[in-house]
Image (cartoon, coloured by chain):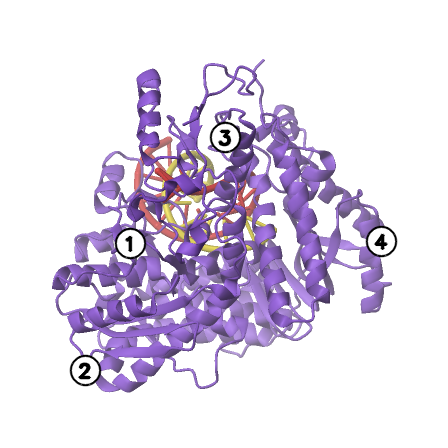
Chain colours: A purple, B red, C yellow
Amino acid sequence: MRLYLRSDDGIASRDAEFFPFFHIADPTLLEGYPKKLWLKELSGDKYYRSLAAFTRWSDMWEAVRFILDRYTDRLKVSAASYLDVPALLLRPDPVSQYLVQSGVTLFNGMQFEDLHRFQLDIETYSGRTSRFSDPDRPEDRIILIAVSDSRGYAEVLDGRALSEPEMLSRLFGIITEKDPDVIEGHNIYNFDLPYILRRCRLHGVEPMLGRDGIRLKPSDGRQMRTERAMEIQIQDIPGRHIIDTWLLLQTYDHSRRKLESYGLKYAAQHFGFATDNRVYINPDRISWTWDHEPDKLAAYALDDVTETRLLSDLLSPPYFYLSQMTPFNYGTAARNGSVTKIESMIIREYVRQRVSIPSPEPTHPTTGGYADVFQTGVLGPILDIDVESLYPSIMLTEVIFPHSETLGVFSAMLESLTKRRLQAKREMKTAKDTSQKAKLDAVQSSFKILINSFYGYLGYSRGLFNDSIAADRVTRKGQELLRGLISVIGEEGGNVVEVDTDGVFFVPPPRLRTEKAEARFVEKLAATLPEGIVLTLNGRYRSMLSYKAKNYALLGYDGRITLKGSSLTSRSIERFGRRYIRQCIEAILHADVSALHDAYLKLYRDISSNRLESGDFSKTETLRDSPEEYGADVAAGKRNRSAPYEAALRELGSWRRGEKVSYYITGKDASGVGFQNCRLSDGWDPVAPDENVQFYLKRLDEISRKFEPFFTPADFRKIFSTEDLFGFSPEGISIRTDSVVRDEEEGDDSEESRMAGEPRIWLDA
DNA sequence: AGCTGTGGCAGGGAGG
DNA sequence: CCTCCCTGCCAC
């Protein structure tokens, strides 16, 4: 056994802190030890030969004891349960979480196609209308299990022919027999697997999903804080990898932001692999369909697993290749963040060179992206340009890297990944074979995933090599580039409408008549940027409705309208409001003032005469905090009472963190306090509607007020009112376009304006 | 154990 | 009334 400790020439800036680790390498000596201890990746024994591991299993405990003896006051020691790691360690804080691999990587030489992938989807029954099926309620249960695999197999286990325990046993039988490497599902982490496990517990069936049983992780419940949060109960299915296409879809959309929902059916349509005869069933009609058209439900479930496989075909390959670059196995690589991956790669080099690792520095608030709106109203035509990979490009051209990272791994990695990505993209273009093309595309996407998080790492408070001053320099440079671009566009006769971080929407100079001329103009703009900063034309639009910063609508040359921004699209706006906003924007973009008035009038009448359904005026919100946390915060005066929580307290009593509830406002007048006048939407009765008409009419007017800036006050009052006894006429009403006046340099408070221009970073004197 | 960042808009309640 | 604070959601 060799034990490496930080050497005196280590690079940690604070000498008092260091991180010992041990490293033992020689895989062959591991043979003869119990499989359970050293087999983790069970895609077939042949892949284990490349695994580095401890010389002897007992060495690990020897090392732990050694460290404990010396550093017992500082180290919180935990034994890693995996042996596919040659180095581990144990320290008070972050490093311990990283599995460090020194040499050869898992899955080396394997292709994505080599994996045997298995898809799984369950349909469940709910005895109560419009509530999710609950695995802890005896009346609720699994009614169908659809399975398929990447080798053409597909089957539906049917609750009509089999009891629930029989279905479960059959499922485990199939999995054991097929013995796949990967189990895939849409939202499988949050729904299918936990549901299956709970039912297994209920029936006393062993959940034999893995090659060696299933391992559970007690949920600590602390993970619900973040957006991506989930209540993962499954730590691992030994021997198999779990791929959740729902998670992959979110990650995919994080950088592209094109998806309106993360539903499987929506994704299948978005990516264009939904078939014409696909069966669609409204989620809240599943139980009804089971009672009345069970065959239809079976067909639906089968379509689900098919689409899951196709979605996975598209989204999961990059993670397979990431597992070849990082010390994370396939399933983990598809689940953890990219910052973790980058850091593990850096640490790997430090381990290899036996240089110690610094601890994270406290982070300071840093400058962010530059966002601004210069014009509001309807403008066109519009060009959308953006700087490609703005922050990574700045880091490379300006040579901005963490100061504590002395080996230069960070910059070398970013450079090499960028180079290799470009190369993969080039090869992809010339590749003849479609499967080769697909592989290269996956490889270049996997590089992109890493490249995009180098900047984020700088400001990440728990990054071992973080450097928020460097992060601030990057964003400042980004702001500088954008401002430069804006002024050049202005000088050339363009009219900048809206800017955000790395992109600009502008009206090109009127002298440009053709698409070609626009492209040449963009090339000219690109030429004004420094070497290494690439500007591209992202899109062309017939017109744009500019509302506020980060809030706008685009009308494409194909007639399609896209809305952006929380004030126009947010799910926290009632459905009737979102629909109404879209109608209004469509009308404004087409300069159809009558349509605006009609939309207002119709909605006004629908609300007044209770013609809307609860789904139209309900709000659906996530209960992020548990009943206890909410109660405590309210009692402590840290937060106000709010309608969704109060309604849930009254009607449900309790809930799980992260559960969503729909509620609406009741009562007679619009001035009441919301949390005292609300009900869960389940209780709404179309025969005796009790929604607060006055309140929702007020909401209609509030929402209408968004369009105030586009009209003169008199015109606005005419359009958005019901007072048209003598008929409404759009005559003489036009849509306003305004330059946004900003009160810079007002001089009212010189201290404040000076501060605004100052770095937000402060350094110790 | 597992967790990238900042900036902007909006609604609701409490308190001046 | 208005302002402040908190929370949620969204753009990049």
In the image, is A479 to the left or to the right of A91? Answer: right
Residue that label 2 marks: A161
Question: For the residue marked with disc 2, what is the amino acid?
Answer: Ala
Indicate which label's residue lies in the foreground, 4 or 3.
3
Mark 3 or mark 4, which is nearer the start of the sequence?
A: 3
Disc 2 vs disc 4: Cβ atoms closer than 8 Å? Answer: no
For image coordinates 66% across by 70% down, the residue present is A556
For image coordinates 30% across by 78% down, the residue present is A156
Mark 4 or mark 1, which is nearer the start of the sequence?
A: 4
The local secondary structure at tag 2 comes to loop
Disc 2 vs disc 1: Cβ atoms closer than 8 Å? Answer: no
Between A19 and A222, which is closer to the camera in this rendering?
A19
Query: Residue A524 shows which numbered tag?
Result: 4
Between A459 and A295, which is closer to the camera in this rendering?
A295
CA–CA distance in space, label 1 to label 4:
53 Å
Disc 1 vs disc 4: Cβ atoms closer than 8 Å? Answer: no
Q: Establish whether labels 1 and 4 are both on one chain.
A: yes
The local secondary structure at tag 4 comes to helix
CA–CA distance in space, label 3 to label 2:
56 Å
Chain of the residue displaying label 1: A
